[in-house]
C-alpha cells in the first residue's frame, strides 16, 4: 500500500509538475496571444492610416488630372484659335498684297494719264501757238492785200 501510495504521490507530484508546466505554458501562450492581438491592432491601425493616405493621394491625383484635362482643353482651344488667327493673318496679307498691286497699277495708270495729259497740253499749246501764228500771218496778209487793193 505504501508503495502504491508513494507511486500515487509520485504521480500526483508529476501531475502537479505537468500542471504547473502547462499553466506556465498557458501564461506564455496568453502573453503571446496578447502580443499578437496588440500587433494585429497596430497593423490594422497602420492599414487604416495607409488607406486614408491612399484616399487622400487618389483625391489629389483626381484633382490634378482634372486640372491637367482643363489645361489641355485650354491649350487645344488656344491652338485652334492660333491656327484660325494665322489663317486670317495670311488672308489679310493676301488682300493687302492684292490691294498694294492694285494701287501700284492705278498709280502707273495715273502716271501714264498725267504724262498723256502733259503731252496733250504741250501739243495743244504748240497747236494754239501755231494757230496764233497762222492768224497773225493771215491778218498780216489780209492787211497787205487790203493795202495793195487800195
Image: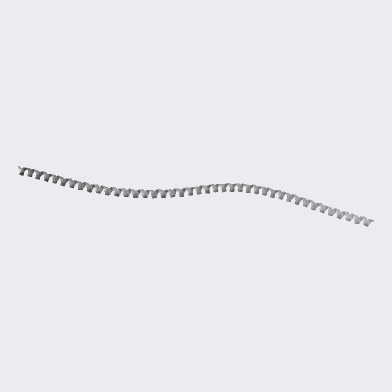
Quarter of the image containing the C terminus?
top left
Q: Residue furthest right?
A: 1
Q: Quadrant of the N terminus?
A: bottom right
Tally of numbered tags: 0
- Image point 82% across, 53% down: which residue? 22
Q: Nearest the camera: 15 or 101? A: 101
In this view, the residue in front, 1 or 48, is 48
The location of residue 8, given as percent across then percent down, is 90, 55
Residue placed furthest toward the front? 149
Residue 78 drawn at (x, y percent) = 48, 48
Front position in the image: 65 or 33: 65
Question: Which residue is located at x 65 percent, y 48 percent?
Answer: 51
Spot occupied by residue 66 in the image (x, y as percentages of width and height) = 56, 47
- Where does the image place residue 65, in percent across and percent down from the top left? 57, 48
Residue pictured at 73% horizontal, 49% vertical: 37
Would residue 81 be found to the left or right of residue 15 on screen?
A: left
**What is the image's colouring?**
one colour
Q: Quick check: 50 left or right of 66?
A: right
Amino acid at each position: 500500500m505504501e508503495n502504491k501510495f508513494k507511486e500515487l504521490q509520485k504521480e500526483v507530484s508529476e501531475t502537479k509538475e505537468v500542471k504547473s508546466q502547462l499553466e506556465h505554458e498557458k501564461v506564455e501562450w496568453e502573453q503571446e496571444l496578447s502580443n499578437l492581438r496588440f500587433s494585429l491592432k497596430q497593423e490594422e491601425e497602420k492599414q487604416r492610416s495607409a488607406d486614408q493616405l491612399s484616399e487622400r493621394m487618389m483625391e489629389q491625383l483626381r484633382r490634378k488630372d482634372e486640372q491637367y484635362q482643363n489645361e489641355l482643353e485650354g491649350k487645344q482651344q488656344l491652338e485652334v484659335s492660333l491656327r484660325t488667327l494665322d489663317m486670317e493673318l495670311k488672308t489679310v496679307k493676301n488682300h493687302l498684297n492684292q490691294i498694294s498691286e492694285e494701287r501700284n497699277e492705278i498709280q502707273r495708270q495715273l502716271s501714264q494719264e498725267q504724262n498723256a495729259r502733259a503731252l496733250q497740253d504741250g501739243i495743244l499749246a504748240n497747236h494754239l501757238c501755231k494757230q496764233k501764228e497762222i492768224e497773225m500771218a493771215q491778218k498780216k496778209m489780209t492787211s497787205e492785200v487790203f493795202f495793195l487793193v487800195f
